[in-house]
Image (cartoon, rainbow, N blue to C red):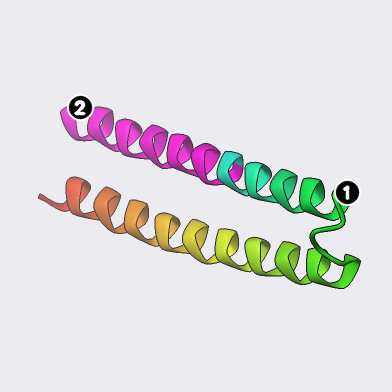
Amino acid sequence: ERRKELSKQVVKMGEDAKVAIRNIRRDAMDVCKAMKKKSEMTEDEEKQSGTLIQDLTDKYVKLLDAAGAAKEKEIMSI
């Protein structure tokens, strides 16, 4: 019973971390849009930056999922 409770906490922490990552992505995209609006960045640079930001977001979400799954498995096996 305690293990199930801990497992739920791991899942919740993982979701909270994903939300934080998405918020960082949104902030970074907003900065890019603001720079384009001020003509500090071209449209192509904005698109490249957006693609890079999305790739990094996807990478870290996958790492987070893997770490969460490993921890959940560890909790349930002990």
Taking 77 as reference, is 56 left or right?
A: right
What are the residue bounds of the magenta stretch? 1-22
Name the residue tied to disc 2.
1
Q: Main SS of the magenta segment?
A: helix
Q: Residues within 10 Å of mark 2 (few under 14, many from 20)?
A: few
Question: At x 31% / y 31%, what residue is drawn?
Answer: 9
Q: Residue furthest left?
A: 78
The quarter of the image holding the N terminus is top left
Question: SS of the residue at dot 1?
Answer: helix
Question: SS of the residue at dot 2?
Answer: loop
Residue 73 percent across, percent down from the top left: 26, 54
Above or below — where is 73 with respect to 55? above
Identify residue type, mark 2.
Glu
Q: Is residue 78 magenta?
A: no
Question: At x 35% / y 55%, what residue is drawn?
Answer: 69
Name the residue tied to disc 1.
37
Q: Disc 2 and disc 1: Cα gap in Å?
A: 54 Å
Residue 50 percent across, percent down from the top left: 74, 62
Viewer-side residue, 43 vs 6: 43
Q: Residues within 10 Å of mark 1 (few under 14, many from 20)?
A: few
Taking 4 as reference, is 54 left or right?
A: right
Q: Quadrant of residue 4?
A: top left
Taking 35 as reference, is 43 left or right?
A: right
Identify residue type, mark 1.
Lys
Viewer-side residue, 3 vs 10: 10
Q: Quadrant of residue 47?
A: bottom right
